[in-house]
Amino acid sequence: MRRRSHPLVLCAALACATLGAAASAWSAEGNVADGEEVFKKCRACHEVGPDAKTKLGPVLNGIIGRKAGTYEGFTYSPANKKAGEEGWVWTEENILKYLANPREAMPGNRMAFAGLAEEQDRLDVLAYLKTFSAK
């Protein structure tokens, strides 16, 4: 004889699954204000905004969708140029991977920054960079 689940058990299971999915979706999004704060770690080398200038690193305005190693007026490492020549585009996925560990994501690049260990910090910086990308 087949045993039937009680309707309350099914409702509770559905509620837990829904809340779990909502929590995952929420945590997978970045916060622009928090990203601006985390980006302070990047400001020694990079700038964004209408008056941004090249420093030790290139300006990051419009980074999303740009081919690696192509910002005009910046001298890139051979590794960064090669990555661009081989088709590396700064997609959201590639930016997140690079922010996690620049040396692992693009071996041989000159960026001295070790990366952002916290996933939420990376998502927040990405959200902040999006505000300086073409719509």
Image (tube, helix red, strand yellow):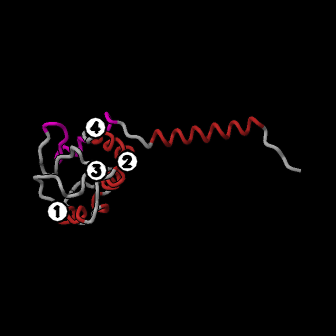
**Pointer 1 or 2: first along the chain:** 1
Residue pointed to by mark 3: 65
Under circle 2, the secondary element is: loop
Residue pointed to by mark 4: 131
**Pointer 4 or 3: first along the chain:** 3
Q: What stretch is highlighted in magenta?
A: 32-51
Q: Which residue is drawn at 84% across and 47% down?
A: 3
In this view, the mark in front (1 or 2): 1
Q: Which of these two is toward me, 16 or 78?
A: 78
Q: What residue type is labelled 3?
A: Gly
Residue contact between numbered discs 4 and 2, judged by CB atoms under 8 Å: no
Residue contact between numbered discs 4 and 1, judged by CB atoms under 8 Å: no
In this view, the mark in front (4 or 2): 4
What whole-number distance in Å separates the C-alpha atoms at marks 3 and 2?
Answer: 24 Å
The numbered mark at residue 118 is: 2
**Pointer 3 or 2: first along the chain:** 3
**Pointer 4 or 1: first along the chain:** 1
Under circle 1, the secondary element is: loop
On the image, which quarter does residue 28 sit in? top left
Residue contact between numbered discs 4 and 3, judged by CB atoms under 8 Å: no
**Pointer 1 or 3: first along the chain:** 3
In this view, the mark in front (3 or 2): 3
Under circle 4, the secondary element is: loop
Characterize the local packing of mark 1: few (<14), some (14-19) or many (20 or more) Cα atoms within 10 angstroms: some
Q: Position of residue 15 (x, y in %)?
A: 63, 36
Under circle 3, the secondary element is: loop
Q: Residue at x 33, y 54 (%)?
A: 100
Q: What residue type is labelled 2?
A: Glu
What whole-number distance in Å separates the C-alpha atoms at marks 4 and 3?
Answer: 13 Å
On the image, which quarter does residue 130 sit in? top left
In reply to whether residue 34 is colored magenta, the answer given is yes
